[in-house]
Amino acid sequence: MKASPQSLDAVDDLENPSSEDDAMLGVRGSLKGRKSFSRFRTYVSLCVAFSFGVGMGLLSRYLLYSPSDNQCVELTTQATPLLEDIMISYGKLTYNGSFMTENIYRQSAAPEVDEAWEALGVNYRSVRIPSERAKEAGLRKDHVQINPKYGGGFPANVEGLHHLHCLNLVRQSLYYNFDYYKAKKQGAFKNDDDILKLHVSHCLDILRQQLMCTIDVGVFGQVWYRPSPGSVPAAFVDFNTQHKCRNFDDIRRWAEVRQLPKDVPEDFLQPPYSDSIILDGVP
């Protein structure tokens, strides 16, 4: 059978070097496309990996340099067992810095004023710190301990509530309150005048040290006010500033529910050990 020119042409085309080159160009074009896609995929993968690395780096930086509330407490507070029992948190609070309007805590001595201060925990009794938690609380073996037959541990007081106790005593000792509390002869006012003076000055200096230790670096702005109707406006300090404050009520309740009994046996405290440090007088 005689081959048709078209068939021969097709065979000749397959054998023609130029046609082979054209075929190879098609193969090379396909390979080139695959290589381009491969490079694109590699590029995308590198971009994703880079973005992931940057994201993880930013997250790590955030976790390292944006501490939690409890981490802030650990960095700014002495040893305390409270951190294991309650979550210390912070919230925004605007101070009542009014100069002319008195709230209950500023008013002259009266039963309702004392009640308001008492509710802050100014006279809470000691709490019990278990012996196994003494070290984390900064307590030493030579600190006073509770007799093991009454549960052992260490009697201790929350320092922040002692600060409030001291502030309350300073309030009671103000010239316009002193006679009222001296006549009642309760608390610190049961003591002789020389002991009372030492107690008040002790409290005053404790508060000085506390305020210097935790000095507030905020600033006061000023507001305009009229000293009298129609007068020229004058400037006055704006004491109503916003602060980030710890959850006071949670801390107060921690101390409230852990108070030792009001009346305890005479042998409630463990006698000093042979190696205990015994001071020659009240420090």
Image (tube, rainbow, N blue to C red):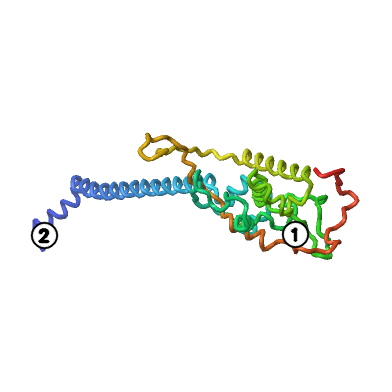
Q: Tag 2: residue type?
A: Ala
Place of residue 36 in the rendered image (x, y in percent of width and height, measured from the top left)? 30, 46
Q: Residue 231 vs residue 159: left or right?
A: left
Nearer to the camera, 187 or 84: 187
Residue at 29% from the left image edge and 46% from the top image edge = 32
Q: Quadrant of residue 252?
A: bottom right
Which residue is label 1 attached to? 130
Q: Which of marks 1 and 2 is nearer the N terminus?
A: 2
Residue 37 position (above or below residue 232): below
Which residue is label 2 attached to? 3
Check if mark 1's residue and mark 2's residue have beta carbons within 8 Å: no
Residue at 48% from the left image edge and 46% from the top image edge = 242
Label 1: how many residues lie within 10 Å, few (<14), some (14-19) or many (20+)? some
Q: Is residue 263 in sight in this rendering?
A: yes
Nearer to the camera, 104 or 67: 104
Q: Residue 192 vs residue 165: left or right?
A: right
Quadrant of the snapshot with the C terminus: top right
Quadrant of the snapshot with the N terminus: bottom left
Q: Tag 1: residue type?
A: Pro
Nearer to the camera, 152 or 278: 278
Helix or strand or loop: what does disc 2 sit on?
loop
